[in-house]
Image (cartoon, grey):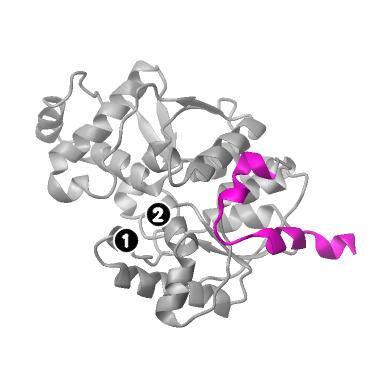
Amino acid sequence: MSDSLNYAYYPGCSGTGTSIEYDMSTRAICAKLGITLNEVPDWSCCGSTPAHTVDHTLSSALSARNLALVEKMNLDTAVTPCPSCLTNLKTATHRMSKDEFRDDVNKLLDTPYNGGVDTKSVLQILVEDMGLDALKAKAVKPLKGLKVAAYYGCIMNRPPEVMNFDDPEHPMAMDNILTALGATVLPFPLKVECCGASFGIPRKDIVMSLSGKLLDAAEDIGAEALVTACPLCQMNLDLRQDQINSANGAKHNIPVFYYTQLIGLALGIDEKELGIDKLCVSPRTVINGIGAEDAS
């Protein structure tokens, strides 16, 4: 475990809106684990999914502005819970390694970005900087008896030359964390398949099909819950589960947790602080079953 777990924190737009429970649970577990998150002052949207489809220079400028703010904080690492934000921040850094591209981006900024900030996901710092043994040692309510499928989504680890974390086709970070905390993590064959997030508004039929396959696969392997690290994936699988059932003639009733919420439960953090009550598909039966065999 590193002696200095002190980072600039970029929550991202989803974290202040549709996935506020992800932000809440991230802040709660980091506080419990002794990880200091310093929110970037005056941060702005990174451009999310749409910006880079229109203009790579402008998209990179949106991310570079935030990274320049981190430079002002005299911190060398920015962390974010959101894979979309992570992708944009890391892609901007990658592209700005070329002098001509960096000059074009900096022309759009009031304060130029010099390239001195590393960007990581919260998942990455838990695995690489804190470590599984240190995390396990903090658990007071192991997740024994809980059977889950860990779903990473399609951008958390890809492209590998930009993301530089975990296996791009068979990531294990969430699997290893949840296993260390006592859960049974089932082998999930679709862990990096797309849920259709970008088509949520223009082509809902695609979301119904792709997200439906993920729910089918989770049920087929006997998972009691899905666990994700992505706000859009979580929204598709949780908020839209009734729509997916209706479109596909299915009857899924599978809770979809953020991995930070399950870490929080294992650390003994109150459910309110983790935003458990904000999940659409009730996780009550699943949560009540954690550790039930030991209790009986």
Q: Main secondary structure of the magenta part?
A: helix
The residue lying at 12 percent from left, 35 percent from top is: 101
- Decide which of 259, 186 is in the foreground and name it: 259
Q: In this rendering, is residue 135 above or below 160?
A: above
User: Mark 2, residues whose alpha carbon is within 10 Å: few (<14), some, or many (≥20)?
Assistant: many
Tell me where residue 228 appears, x and y as whole percent.
50, 56
Residue placed under numbered mark 1 in the picture: 200
- Decide which of 259, 212 is in the foreground and name it: 212
Can see residue 254? yes
State the image quarter where residue 40 is shown: top left
Q: Is residue 100 left or right of residue 223?
A: left
User: Mark 1, residues whose alpha carbon is within 10 Å: few (<14), some, or many (≥20)?
Assistant: some
Query: Sequence-wise, which precedes: disc 1 or disc 2?
Result: 1
**Residue segment shown in magenta:** 271-296
Q: Secondary structure at mark 2?
A: helix
Q: Secondary structure at mark 1?
A: loop
Mark seen at residue 232: 2
The answer for how far apart the CA atoms under marks 1 and 2 are is: 9 Å
Tell me where residue 269 appears, x and y as whole percent.
70, 40
Quadrant in the picture for the C terminus: bottom right
| Residue type, numbered disc 1 | Gly
Q: Nearer the viewer, mark 1 or mark 2?
A: 1
